[in-house]
Amino acid sequence: RGLEVKIRMRNTIQFDEQLEVVDQLYDVEVREKGDYSYLLFYNEEKEKVVLKFHEEELVMTRFSSPKTIMRFLKEAASLAYIPTPMGVQEFIIQTSHYQVDQQMIELAYQLQNKEGNPFADYRLEITWG
């Protein structure tokens, strides 16, 4: 078993003219395996969430039904598969800022639809310890 600490996820979401801040605190287990670090926790819906990351990439998997997978690449675009009321939607994740420190991940990204039209802008700060 890894180290049990707290994780705080603070996400600032800009959607059209609206600004929303989601601030969440969970018990988290920290593990290291190979080049990756892992943060494992359960969200308020009791779904298991795994953050797998290193310097260049963060993969966020939420074991919802169907599961949600978001992949963030440093200064590159990637795809996200997100369940919505209309079925699983494919989004483009355009990551403009990605930085990993000791116990912090900073992320700025934009979700776009498949045509490349912006859906929302996000600034996510993840800290643990």
Image (cartoon, grey):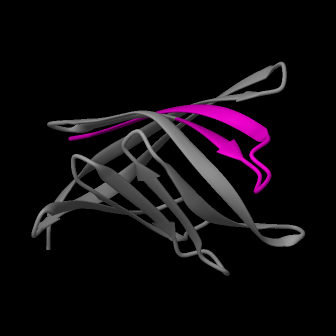
Magenta-colored segment: predominant secondary structure: strand
Front-lying residue, 25 or 37 = 37
* Residue at the (33%, 53%) spot, across then down: 57
* Residue at the (76%, 38%) spot, across then down: 118
- 22 on left or right of 89: left
Whether residue 19 appears in magenta in the rendering, the answer is no
- Image coords of residue 109 (percent x, y): 55, 37
- Image coords of residue 75 (percent x, y): 41, 39
Magenta residues, start to end: 109-129
Front-lying residue, 118 or 1 = 118
Query: Quadrant location of the C terminus?
Result: top left
- Image coords of residue 50 (percent x, y): 39, 66
Q: Quadrant of residue 101?
A: top left
- Image coords of residue 87 (percent x, y): 83, 74
* Residue at the (67%, 44%) spot, across then down: 111
* Residue at the (12%, 63%) spot, across then down: 35
